[in-house]
Amino acid sequence: MEKELVRYRCIADDGRCLDVIEYQHFRIVDTDSGVRQYPGARRWATANDEAVRYIDKETFEIIDTGQLVRRQD
């Protein structure tokens, strides 16, 4: 499964506003001690599901276009 961790309000180099969403994969396992969630890999994408690369805490790159987007908060 995958869950949304956080949403960042960003602005692209071309001036458009967009959201970059951080997701994390996780596995749910029913153990003798109860149900457990095991976190896995994280990924970033725009709200339109364009793949995004994390550059630093303020900057992301849209992989297909190479366009940089920066956090606004």
Image (cartoon, rainbow, N blue to C red):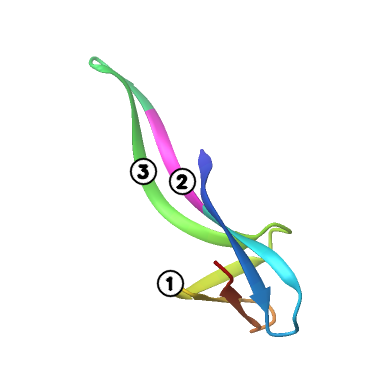
- Point 61% across, 61% down: residue: 45
Q: Residues within 10 Å of mark 3 (few under 14, many from 20)?
A: some
- Point 43% across, 72% down: residue: 57
- Point 63% across, 69% down: residue: 10
- In the rendered image, residue 25 lying in the magenta stretch gets the answer yes
Between 60 and 2, which is closer to the camera in this rendering?
60
Circle 3 is placed at which residue position? Answer: 39
SS for dot 1: loop
Q: Residues within 10 Å of mark 2 (few under 14, many from 20)?
A: some
Residue 73, picture quadrant:
bottom right
Q: Amino acid at mark 3?
A: Pro
- N-terminal-most mark, 2 or 3: 2
In the image, is residue 30 above or below residue 6? Answer: above
Circle 2 is placed at which residue position? Answer: 25
Between 15 and 49, which is closer to the camera in this rendering?
15
For the residues labelled 2 and 3, the Cα–Cα distance comes to 6 Å
In the image, is residue 47 above or below residue 17? Answer: above
